[in-house]
Image (cartoon, rainbow, N blue to C red):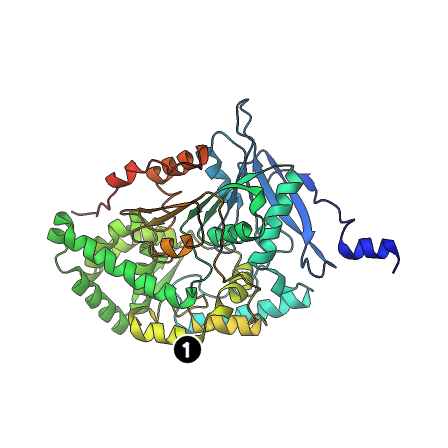
């Protein structure tokens, strides 16, 4: 065999990845923006894709040489909005990017065209079925465009992080991942440990957990935890003495007689399961958890104005469009759902039935319609070894909020099993993304990145608590 053929076959002449600078989009807080071209499938590199990269350069003379690489959640969350986090790391460069298939990366696995006619929130059975049909059509369109949907996974994304590091000319980097970003960060730790100085995992997803099934249990645990916290709080208990009964009454009433509520320029009907969806969304943040008892009582008394003024209702109307839905399913189908089963999911809802019609209604990780999307997209085979535990000695900080409904604090111990140099911290009174979402979390993260060899001072956590909104 000719020597040149051997060299080409082994990739020895492969070019280093390059950064192609472009003007930063309007409103993006970055000093450099551009693209890095990478193979779509590194095992069969016949097609390339472009990753949209955002750099916030720190121009102080004494800045640390090792930047923070922030890995956004979702999967499918647009990274441009994450550039606002650069201010938390004021002594080093900050880098983030739209993961493959997401946002401004090319191609984007965008399904908005097919789902334009579907209700974006609180779907009933009809809307959920319409959403499923739209996603099936989107998968057909993406495949017809020549996109290999099976290549949009954590294994390839981890290699993307390494290629971006090399393209920007950095040595060792610090990884900070939030939610799904922790899942990706762990994959980088598995495959490219030599590139890492330290890792922060905020709202950690252990790769070995059966997430479609365990998410149902986690939501129930968070809900019961909030109910117990209200009972234990003298002011909350006095104002809302029978909160769980009030919740049950609202659910039953709305199941019989749905409520019509203004939604933007239109209206939306909220039935019992729509109400449960609002409860679930409320569990994501300590701000919305604080309002949950007062919201339940207001709805029991028919005060719909309280819903329109609530933080969770405003949040609901502002979360559409921040996730590239096609990328969400491409990553989750082979990375999570292929390792789970419909039988296990059905058993979880049999044990915790109050979430079946909300968490389990629309296409998602913990829904039968989500599994149907994966079948329609041909993404039912597990993606490599992505669900095996990660073993690493890279210094790692793991954070969780006490009431997190989707990445519960009990997952901290599971994620840390193979991490020999890890510090784990549960933040009381907090919910999803507690590390980046609280001042205490910020201080702990900064201390850890300053000296990853020392356990960070977490005394601020002792002062954290949940403050319920009371009359």
For this rendering, which residue is in front, 191 or 179?
191
In this view, the residue farthest toward the bottom is 343
At x 57%, y 70%, the residue is 379
* Number of callouts: 1
Kindly indicate the quadrant of the structure image that contains residue 317. Answer: bottom left
Taking the image as shown, residue 383 lies to the left or right of residue 279, namely: right
Q: Residue at x 56, y 26 (%)?
A: 59
Look at 65% across and 37% down and name the residue there.
169
**Residue 100 sits in quarter:** bottom right
Decide if residue 303 is in sight here: no
In the image, what residue occupies the spot 30% across and 70% down? 352
The kind of secondary structure element at disc 1 is: helix
Q: Is residue 134 left or right of residue 217?
A: right
Which x, y percent locates residue 25?
59, 40
Name the quadrant of the N terminus.
bottom right
Please determine whether, in this image, residue 84 is positioned above or below residue 326: above
Q: Which residue is mark 1?
A: 343
Above/below status of 330 relative to 55: below
322 with respect to 194 (left or right):
left
- Closer to the camera in the image, 387 or 283: 387
Residue 43 location (% of width, % of height): 69, 60
Q: State whether residue 4 appears in this view.
A: yes
Crowdedness of circle 1 by 10 Å Cα count: few (<14), some, many (20+)? few
Q: Position of residue 277 (x, y in %)?
A: 34, 63
Q: Residue furthest top?
A: 61
Q: Nearer the viewer, residue 55 or 142?
A: 55
Question: Residue 445 at what x, y percent from top left?
Answer: 41, 38
Q: Quadrant of residue 208?
A: bottom left
């Amino acid at each position: 065999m000719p020597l040149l053929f051997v060299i080409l076959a082994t990739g020895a002449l492969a070019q280093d990845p390059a950064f192609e600078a472009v003007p930063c989009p309007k409103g993006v807080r970055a000093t450099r923006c551009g693209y890095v071209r990478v193979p779509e499938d590194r095992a069969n590199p016949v097609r390339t894709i472009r990753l949209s990269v955002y750099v916030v350069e720190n121009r102080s003379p004494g800045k640390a040489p090792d930047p923070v690489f922030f890995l956004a959640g979702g999967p499918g969350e647009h990274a441009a909005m994450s550039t606002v986090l650069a201010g938390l790391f004021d002594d080093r460069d900050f880098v983030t990017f739209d993961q493959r298939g997401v946002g401004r990366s090319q191609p984007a696995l965008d399904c908005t065209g097919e789902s334009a006619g579907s209700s974006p929130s609180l779907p009933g059975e009809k809307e959920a079925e319409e959403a499923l049909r739209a996603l099936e059509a989107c998968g057909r369109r993406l495949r017809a465009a020549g996109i290999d949907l099976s290549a949009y996974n954590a294994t390839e994304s981890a290699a993307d992080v390494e290629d971006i590091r090399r393209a920007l000319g950095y040595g060792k980097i610090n990884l900070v991942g939030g939610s799904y970003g922790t899942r990706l960060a762990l994959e980088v730790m598995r495959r490219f440990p030599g590139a890492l100085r330290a890792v922060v995992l905020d709202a950690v997803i252990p790769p070995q957990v059966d997430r479609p099934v365990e998410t149902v249990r986690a939501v129930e645990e968070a809900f019961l935890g909030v109910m117990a916290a209200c009972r234990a709080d003298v002011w909350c208990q006095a104002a809302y003495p029978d909160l769980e009964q009030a919740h049950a009454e609202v659910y039953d009433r709305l199941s019989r007689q749905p409520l019509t509520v203004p939604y933007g320029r239109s209206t939306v009907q909220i039935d019992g399961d729509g109400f449960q969806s609002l409860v679930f969304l409320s569990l994501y943040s300590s701000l919305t958890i604080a309002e949950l008892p007062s919201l339940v009582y207001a709805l029991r008394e028919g005060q719909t104005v309280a819903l329109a003024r609530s933080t969770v209702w405003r949040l609901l109307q502002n979360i559409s469009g921040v996730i590239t839905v096609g990328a969400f399913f491409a990553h989750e189908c082979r990375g999570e759902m292929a390792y789970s089963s419909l039988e296990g999911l059905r058993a979880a809802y049999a044990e915790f039935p109050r979430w079946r019609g909300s968490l389990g209604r629309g296409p998602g990780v913990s829904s039968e319609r989500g599994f149907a999307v994966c079948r329609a997209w041909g993404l039912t085979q597990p993606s490599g070894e992505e669900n095996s535990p990660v073993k690493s000695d890279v210094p790692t900080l793991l954070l969780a909020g006490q009431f997190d409904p989707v990445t519960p604090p009990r997952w901290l111990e599971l994620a840390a099993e193979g991490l020999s140099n890890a510090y784990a911290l549960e933040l009381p009174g907090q919910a999803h993304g507690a590390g980046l979402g609280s001042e205490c979390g910020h201080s702990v993260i900064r201390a850890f990145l300053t000296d990853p060899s020392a356990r960070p001072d977490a005394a601020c956590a002792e002062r954290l608590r949940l403050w319920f909104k009371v009359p």
